């Protein structure tokens, strides 16, 4: 499996406090069957590290992880909180796309309305392919919005925890509907050290409900576009 959304890189956001926590997360992911992981630290609020510094930290961490026996392939991206400056910063090379591709992981406000479809259109017009992070968590996004996002050229990511309804069932109903309508492009962990990794359980759920071919697309094949 390929995990395209993770907060594993240590000491850059709220994902991992130190090297030991990061290695523990990677080992668990490997045991769950994940062999490719995109590290996507936040770019929002106080988590504002830019591309060059993150790349340095990633290269160092990648070397140490290999020395410590991690076999999973590691790639670098960024989860970018959408603001009016996001596209400009991307064009200037100050923010990270997914493994230096045209694909960009974008998140929006979890409480207050944001015009996600308009933002997706802006990213696409600028030459990027936006992946809307954990779309099920935005209370103002409706199924019609998700369909429009796809029509415009955006892609949809949901969290593995939401697929299986853990730690609560709040988002499972929404994700199930999106899966039934074949609107989902990626299932990813969005793992932090304080969150359980549900990738293996989510894969088994999708395979049982929608078949192995769909599961392989959502957990592996679609990510081949950038890693």
Image (cartoon, helix red, strand yellow):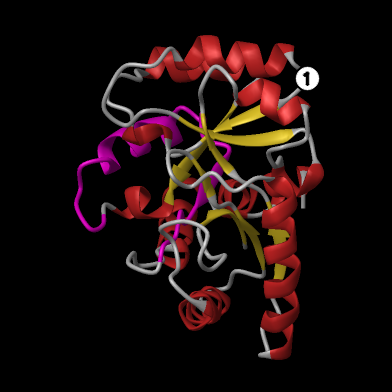
Which quarter of the image is occupied by the N terminus? bottom right
Q: Name the residue that disc number 1 marks.
A: 127
Q: Which of 20 and 38 is in front in this view?
A: 20
In percent of width and height, residue 20 lies at 49, 83
Q: Is residue 1 left or right of residue 114?
A: right
Residue 152 appears in the picture as rendered: no
In percent of width and height, residue 168 lies at 19, 52
Q: Residue 55 occupies which quadrant of the picture?
A: bottom right
Identify the magenta region.
166-192
In percent of width and height, residue 130 lies at 63, 28
Q: In this view, does 140 lie to the left or right of 99?
A: left
- 172 in the magenta segment: yes
Q: Is residue 182 left or right of residue 167?
A: right
Q: Nearer the viewer, residue 162 or 15?
A: 15
Which residue occupies 54% across, 80% down?
23
Q: Residue 93 occupies which quadrant of the picture?
A: top right
What is the secondary structure assignment of the residue under circle 1? loop
- The furthest residue to the bottom: 68
In percent of width and height, residue 221 lies at 71, 50
Crowd tier of the residue under label 1, counting other residues whose Cα lies within 10 Å: few below 14, some 14–19, many 20 or above: few
Q: Which of 31 and 44 is in front in this view?
A: 44
- 89 in the magenta segment: no
Is residue 27 shown above or below 76? below
Residue 13 appears in the picture as rendered: yes
Q: How many labels does the image show?
A: 1
Which residue occupies 52% across, 75% down?
22
Q: Which of 177 and 158 is in front in this view?
A: 158
Q: Residue 36 occupies which quadrant of the picture?
A: bottom right
């Amino acid at each position: 499996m390929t995990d395209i959304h993770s907060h594993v890189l240590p000491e850059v956001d709220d994902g991992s406090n130190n090297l030991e926590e990061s290695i523990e997360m990677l080992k668990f992911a490997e045991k769950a069957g994940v062999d490719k992981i995109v590290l996507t630290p936040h770019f929002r609020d106080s988590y504002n590290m830019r591309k060059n510094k993150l790349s340095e930290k990633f290269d160092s961490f990648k070397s140490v992880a290999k020395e410590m026996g991690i076999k999973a392939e590691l790639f670098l991206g960024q989860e970018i909180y959408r603001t009016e400056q996001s596209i400009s910063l991307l064009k200037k090379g100050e923010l990270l796309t997914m493994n230096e591709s045209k694909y960009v992981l974008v998140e929006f406000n979890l409480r207050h309305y944001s015009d996600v479809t308009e933002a997706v259109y802006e990213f696409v017009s600028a030459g990027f392919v936006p992946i809307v992070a954990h779309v099920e968590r935005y209370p103002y996004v409706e199924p019609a919005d998700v369909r429009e996002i796809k029509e415009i050229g955006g892609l949809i990511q949901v969290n593995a925890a939401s697929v299986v309804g853990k730690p609560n069932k709040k988002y499972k109903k929404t994700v199930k509907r999106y899966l039934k309508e074949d609107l989902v492009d990626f299932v990813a962990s969005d793992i932090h050290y304080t969150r359980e990794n549900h990738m293996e359980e989510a894969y088994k759920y999708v395979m049982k409900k929608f078949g192995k071919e769909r599961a392989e697309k959502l957990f592996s094949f679609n990510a081949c576009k950038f890693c």
